[in-house]
Amino acid sequence: MHIDYQETSKDLLTRIEIHEEYGSANIDVWTTDLLDPQPGMKILDVGCGAGKLSFLFDDYTKGGANIIGGDFSEELLEKARARNKERGSQVEFQFLDFNQPFNFADNAFDLCTSAFAIYYARNLNFTFGEAHRVLKPGGRLFVSGPLPENKQMFYDIIEEAANAAIPPMPGSSRFKGEIFGTIDSIFARTELRTFENHLTFPEVEPFIEYVRASLNEDRKLWTSMFDNRDEYEALIVKITDAARRRFERDGKLVMTKVVGGILATK
Ligand SMILES: C[S@@+](CC[C@H](N)C(=O)[O-])C[C@H]1O[C@@H](n2cnc3c(N)ncnc32)[C@H](O)[C@@H]1O
């Protein structure tokens, strides 16, 4: 049996909807407060997915910025283009694989962003070197991703259900150390900001929906926990039981997303 770990638009959009419905804080507000993008800016959004961040900047600048969203998933690019058309906005969505040279001139962008994506890069020096190259002098890089304390309750429940240790997650385990260190070594100034969002699930089902929509995001976890569809479904039953026990004990399920934002200046 084959588990396809490539992010599907359905999983990504399910997670975005769950954050919107059950979250206590709005990451979009945090992002725009931090970056304050302006009309006239040239912005590159790397690993743009279905375009969430690109559209956020487009709304914030009232269509005044020149925004390019790049991703290697044609499925997600198609979603982004369809949404772009629906909105009547002028964001440009194009193929970009962040493990390959970026197809842009040097010193082209004022802002290069990447939300929950670029930390999967194979060679961090290469990828962040490309981000640095395409930014103008004084241009800013913004990279967001999970910190190690992210979603502790999610991992606790899965650990209890599977009765097995959770492997370090590739995103969060690299974010503060390796990724921050690489960016800091390439850029003139680098700082780390944090954002906390408490997701309060009023029942078990939406939490399980979130668990199922996390196959790609936490693929290292799942690879260590099951080999085929039957084992996966059996694990989901155990996770549901563990979540129910916690729900009965606490009357709710609260999962805190702890996100880091690395902000760097060329
Ligand atoms: C968790 S999603 C985040 C998407 C979007 N930034 C958002 O915040 O909704 C991760 C994204 O990284 C993209 N991605 C993964 N590897 C990539 C690569 N090598 N080059 C470009 N995009 C990649 C995936 O296709 C996916 O769209």
Image (cartoon, rainbow, N blue to C red):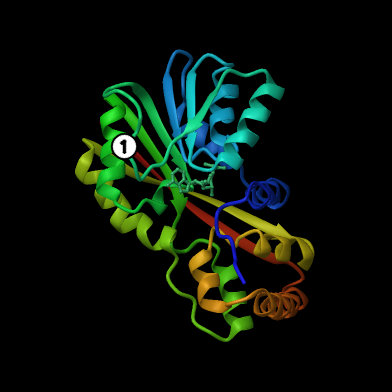
Q: Nearer the viewer, residue 188 or 216?
A: 216
Q: Quadrant of the N terminus?
A: bottom right
Secondary-structure class at tag 1: loop
Q: Which residue sits furthest front? A: 1
Where residue 134 sits in the image (x, y, percent)?
Answer: 30, 28
Q: Is mark 1 within 8 Å of ligand 1?
A: no
Query: To which residue does mark 1 refer?
Result: 101
Comparing 119 with 157, the one in front is 119
Q: Residue at x 30, y 42 (%)?
A: 128
- 192 on left or right of 223: left
Task: Kindly indicate the quadrant of the structure image that contains residue 51.
Answer: top right
Q: Position of residue 126 (x, y in %)?
A: 26, 44
Q: Position of residue 193 (x, y in %)?
A: 40, 45
For badge 1, the amino acid type reads: Pro
Q: Is residue 150 above or below residue 71?
A: below
Q: Is residue 263 left or right of residue 181?
A: right
- Answer above or below: position of 105 versus 164: above
Residue 162 percent location from the top left of the image: 60, 83
Marker count (numbered):
1
* Residue positioned 25% across, 39% down in the render: 129
Q: Residue at x 71, y 52 (%)?
A: 22
Q: Is residue 123 left or right of residue 159?
A: left
Crowd band around label 1 with a 10 angstrom C-alpha radius: few (<14), some (14–19), many (20+): few
Q: Which quadrant would the C terminus be assigned to in this image?
A: top left
Residue 156 occupies quadrant: bottom right
Vertical placement of 191 versus 167: above or below?
A: above
| Residue at 39%, 37% in the rendered image | 142
